[in-house]
Amino acid sequence: MARKEVLGIGSLSRNFRALKTGMQTRTGRAMVVAAGGVLKRKAKANAQALGLKRTGSMIKNIVIKRESRSPPDTVQYNLGVRHGRNLTKKQKSTAKLAVGRGGRIVKRYEDDPYYWRFQELRTRYREATPFLGPALEQGKKEAIDAMEKRLQQELEKAGKE
């Protein structure tokens, strides 16, 4: 997907560097999750406003997920739509077997929004109706505010200990 960078968060990074090393990872994750929650709500609202709620499975599966292979000293979360192998155990337990292309037997999961990238990006025959990209553009300021608020909470918590 596309990379987006937000500039102008100097005071936020200065306050963050004031934390102890062990606390930086925990606080960094908490800050990014707070911002991701804001962006996730925006993306769900955008998808709903665009009329993409046929079954509701795509909107239900908009999530933020921590990147397990992120670079060292970096907290990275992805905002996207959970699909295919990454569905929950409950959704996978209701899988049905079907005959796919070439006669192979495949699993069809319930509430699997495999079609989300057709909506977000585009196909040769269909124009895009993006909901994740605009959510980032619309919620950029709110996400930074949520990160600042979470950092202040963590700093107050560290001061009490």
Image (spheres, grey):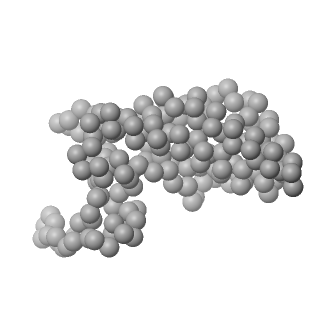
As drawn, 60 above or below 151: below
* Residue 45 place in picture, x, y as percent: 39, 37
142 above or below 66?
A: above
- Can residue 2 be seen at all in this image of the molecule? no
The answer to which of 23 and 56 lies nearer the viewer is 56
Report the side of 78 relative to 85 (left or right).
Answer: right
Q: Position of residue 12 (x, y in %)?
A: 73, 34
Report the residue at 87% width, 48% height from top: 159
How many numbered callouts?
A: 0
Q: Residue at x 86, y 51 (%)?
A: 160
Q: Is residue 73 visible?
A: yes
Q: Quadrant of residue 108?
A: bottom left
Residue under the image location 44 percent in, 42 percent down: 1
User: Which x, y percent locates residue 23?
Assistant: 78, 54
Query: Based on the displayed image, in which of its 4 quarters is residue 156 positioned?
Result: top right
Residue under the image location 75 percent in, 36 percent down? 13
Quadrant into which the C terminus falls: bottom right
- Identify the residue at the far front of this view: 160
**Horizontal arrangement in the rendering, residue 160 relative to residue 8 (left or right):** right
Outermost top residue: 8
In the depicted structure, whether residue 64 falls above or below residue 147: below
